Structures are given as C-alpha cells and as structure tokens.
Image (cartoon, helix red, strand yellow):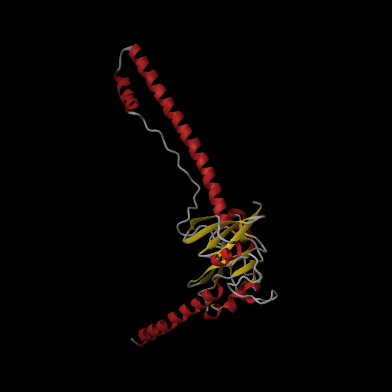
Amino acid sequence: MRTTLAVLTLSLFTQPAQGQSEERIRAFFEGQSVRLKIEMPGSSEGVDVYPALVQPIDFPRHASRLKRYGTAIRRGEEVLITKIKLKSDLIEFQLGGGGYGTFGDDTSPHVSAETATKTEREKNLERDIPKTTDPVQLRKLREELDALKKARQRADARNRAEAAQAQQIKEANIRQRRLEGGSRFNLRYKPEVPAEAVTPEAMMEALAAYVDFSLITGAGAGPVTPGGTGNGELRKGLTLTEVDALLGRPDAISIRKEGTLTVSTSTYTTRDRRITAEFVEGVLIRFTITSP
C-alpha cells in the first residue's frame, strides 16, 4: 500500500514537471528560425540523433534517407521551427512542417487499374455455345464471343495505361510534397528522456553540430528581435502582418493543408519583382523572388 502511494505521489509531481519543461522548450523554439549545417531528408523520419553516443548520427542511414526521400532542406538554408514535441524516449525538433509522411499524408504512389467486366451478352454466349449444335450458328456465336473478349482486353489495356500515367503523376506529386514538407531531428534517449535534456540549452548543445542557432541566440549575428522586421528586409520568421506591411497587400492568396498544418501562399508584385511567400500558422517559412 505504501509503495502504491509512493508511486502515485511521484507520478503527480513528475507529470506536471514534464509538462512545464515541454512548455518551456516549445515557447523558446517554436516560431523561431535556424540555419541547417547538414542536408535534411524529405520525410517525417527525419534525422535520428543519439546525444549519448560518440557518433550521434548514423550517417549511412542518413544518406539512405536522403537518397530515398530527396533533400527537403539544404545546408545553409534558413527554416522555421514549427513544432517541438516531447515523448517518452525522444524529443521531436520539427522544421518547416516536420516532414512529409505524418498521419493523413498519402505516401503510396500505387494506382490500381480498373478491370473491364464481362457483359451480359458475353456471359450468355459462354453459356449458349456448348449447347449449340448447328455449325453455322456455332461459328457466328464464337466469332461474336471472340470480338467481345478482344474488346474487353482492349479496355483493360487502356485502363492499365491510364493507371500507369496516373501513378507517374502521383509519384511526382509525392516527391514535390516531400521537398515542400520540411523535416525533423529526433533526439533519442534510452530508456527515456532525462529531465536535464528537456531545456533549450541542452537541446541546442545536442544539435550544435547540425544546426546554427545564431538567429535565435544572436551569437555572431548581432542582436535579434523576435518578430521584428529589423532593417526592413524580407526574411523567414516574419509574421503575415509584418510581410504585408513590408510588401503591401498581396495580389492573390491560396490555402492548402499539409498534414495537420495550414499553409497559405501569398503573391506580391512590386515594380521589379514578384514574390511568392508561404506561411505556416501565419509565420513566413519560405519565399521565392522572380521577375514579374
């Protein structure tokens, strides 16, 4: 009985502490931008980091994921930290949407081909031919049945060709979504995440070899004002309101879902350039500049 009470008491004090730690790291990181020091795969599998090991990353596995899923975030690119999630044995450090392949994302490129079914006439002919004794009539029935079978085979061939084309389009769409869906680091611990690892300082230390945090800390880059427009230049991490204030009202706005995230795309036109900006939950995650 005393043992049970002790476990319950420990649980009551531990769970709120974990919740407070997660709230702290989420408040510190989410919505901020960082620069990557390594290439990141276009998958929710991301990059596994084992801080307790001498070699924290299994680079052959990392290379395999890059080859399989493509590169969603390149070395030196700025990207928004979109989510921090604490689990029992890992901390998810999600970037630019967390990677394609989460719940609700269609990762299978397979498209099934429809099969042409037999018509009632074909079924009737197959039933009547064995009963027909007249040679002339039998020949006519067989010719008709053969024509119907060939027509069905041609329909099957068309369906397979259409399915193959649809599958190619779907594969290209998935590849593009992987490149646009971001990625993540998985800070993994055994048997569970220690309390001392759930701090901004510990997480930045664990990821220091792979992530440049100077945009958050200001180290080596002068003071950083979160949410401010600074020198008035467009940069990732600005809010939708700040971008509108900088570029004016957008010419067009579109909205789409990326897993559980809502992504809005605004297009702005100035005298000498066209800017396409993508926002996740109202924060700028990427933009492109082209000639109008």
User: Residue 11, located in which quarter of the rendered image?
Assistant: bottom left
Q: Is residue 197 left or right of residue 208?
A: left
Q: Is residue 47 visible?
A: no
The one of 102 and 246 positioned closer to us in this rendering? 246
The image shows residue 28 at horizontal and vertical percentages of 55, 76
The image shows residue 110 at horizontal and vertical percentages of 49, 46
Q: Is residue 128 left or right of residue 171?
A: left
Going 48% across and 53% down the picture, which residue do you hit? 106
Q: Quadrant of the N terminus?
A: bottom left
The image shows residue 239 at horizontal and vertical percentages of 55, 67
How many numbered marks appear?
A: 0
The image shows residue 102 at horizontal and vertical percentages of 49, 59
Whether residue 118 is situated above or below residue 179 in the rendered picture:
above
Whether residue 162 is situated above or below residue 198 in the rendered picture:
above
Residue furthest out toward the right: 220
User: Residue 228, located in which quarter of the rendered image?
Assistant: bottom right
Going 52% across and 75% down the picture, which residue do you hit? 27
Q: Is residue 201 visible?
A: yes
The one of 282 and 61 positioned closer to us in this rendering? 282
Going 30% across and 17% down the picture, which residue do you hit? 132
Q: Is residue 21 left or right of residue 47?
A: left
Whether residue 171 is situated above or below residue 38 in the rendered picture:
above
User: Residue 75, located in which quarter of the rendered image?
Assistant: bottom right
Going 35% across and 29% down the picture, which residue do you hit? 119
The one of 81 and 100 positioned closer to us in this rendering? 81
The one of 90 and 237 positioned closer to us in this rendering? 237
Residue furthest out toward the bottom: 2
